[in-house]
Image (cartoon, helix red, strand yellow):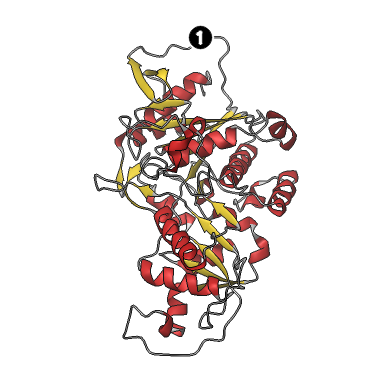
Amino acid sequence: MLDFVPAWFNNSFLALQSSLCPCSLGLSPSSSFPSLSFSGLTQFQLLTSSKADRVIHVSNSSRIFASAGLSVLPSFGFLFDIDGVLVRGKTPIPAAKRAFQKLVNSQGQFLVPVVFVTNAGNCLRQKKADQLSHLLGISQDQVMMSHSPLRMFKRYHEKCVLVSGQGPLLDIAQDLGFCQPITIDTLREKRPLLDAVDHDRRPSILVSAHFSVVLFGEPVRWETSLQLIIDVLLTSGYPGNPYGQENYPHIPVLACNMDLMWVAEAQSPRFGHGTFMVCLENIYKKITGKELKYEALMGKPSRLTYQYAEHLIRAQALQRSWEQPILTLYAVGDNLMTDVYGANLQGSKPRIQAKVSGAAAHCKSVLVCTGVYNPHNEVPLDTRDSITETVFHGHRDFRFDPGLVEPDHIVPDVDAAVDLVFQLENFAPN
């Protein structure tokens, strides 16, 4: 499996850890993190006859707390996916509001550290936070987009980067620290002959510059973006020049959001950025005979994403003066190939590594059934089956491991996930 965390990135993270404070992660010192009344709890217990044949058993017994051994300070945190867990498109999932009524107190403060980790990358963090405001007040400091780790890639911030995706791309890039972003549309306007699909464009002049490429998300016009990105890669950042076989390894490519599919209001999943990446990779290989290489892959299931999310969790705990160390992260998602795979990958890191770095010792995956996941589909037990894309929807550079798509827990929805975690942690906030 490709290591998505470059050595220089790890060094940056170690420096960040040594001086961890809210400001170091872009958190406002005055930020308040938007807490639980226990009326009853449905207990969910996962019983498995085999890893590919899971059954959820539900008992309607109320939760009764013993007077001893209860924790009022959190030693755990939540990483919530958004699409398919909290909302479907713009429509809230009913269980989400019930879950958040248990997660915040009367002052609107979270009872445990919470980060919303989404693979979306077509908007600013604040807009995504605003979209969740119908559930409760959420600070942008709690929202982690697929592109958020790019803040750490300072070596590219002063360079010219070609950005692909949709939405306010320049605003997103500049907010992340990039000083010289260029969009596909800008390149298309300046080099119209490169976009042969549109016959109405007229030539103009652009001084060529050396590019890196940042893929934020799926674009609107796939054919134009694919064409121009290939041009940049095969000319070492000088589009308009002839293709050259010597331009390999190609210029750096950083990609965010590897989801092959995602769910909105439609009954069936929609193509995600992972599908666009499949197109780009195969076109590049068909032309050159070589593999497209990534400098880094971000978004779930990349380990880099979970490392960054964990630092946000610890920053929240520090800001709230919770002295109890965060020992366990519960990643709640709807996608086996991103949410579960990524959480299990992060949880599989050597225990000694977690102890040395001060990271959480455990990362547990909790799968909900309100999004992409279909409990009637089986996961292949034979790794040789992973080459079949109809089965393995993960990115090309992730080797399929059946153990990494086995969730620690399966629950019907996010409300049940919160109940389950509180019970597992014996957590009873004031």
Query: Is the residue 379 above or below the residue 117 in the image?
Result: above
Question: Which of the 4 image quarters holds residue 73?
Answer: top right
Q: Position of residue 300 (x, y in %)?
A: 50, 45
Q: Position of residue 383 (x, y in %)?
A: 48, 34
Which of the pair 102/226 is nearer the observer? 226
Q: Position of residue 58 (x, y in %)?
A: 33, 17
Say what secondary structure mark 1 lies in: loop
Which of the pair 305/268 is nearer the observer? 268
Which of the pair 368/378 is nearer the observer? 378
Question: Which of the 4 image quarters holds residue 95?
Answer: top left
Mark 1 highlights which residue? Answer: 66
Callout 1 amino acid = Ala
- Residue located at (42% from left, 68% from top): 226
49 horizontally vs 241: left or right: left
Q: Is residue 105 visible?
A: no
As drawn, the residue found furthest toward the front would be 289
98 horizontally vs 212: left or right: left
Q: Is residue 69 visible?
A: yes
Query: Is the residue 70 above or below the residue 385 in the image?
Result: above
- Residue located at (35% from left, 66% from top): 220
Query: Quarter of the image containing the N terminus?
Result: top right
Q: Position of residue 425 (x, y in %)?
A: 53, 21
333 horizontally vs 212: left or right: left
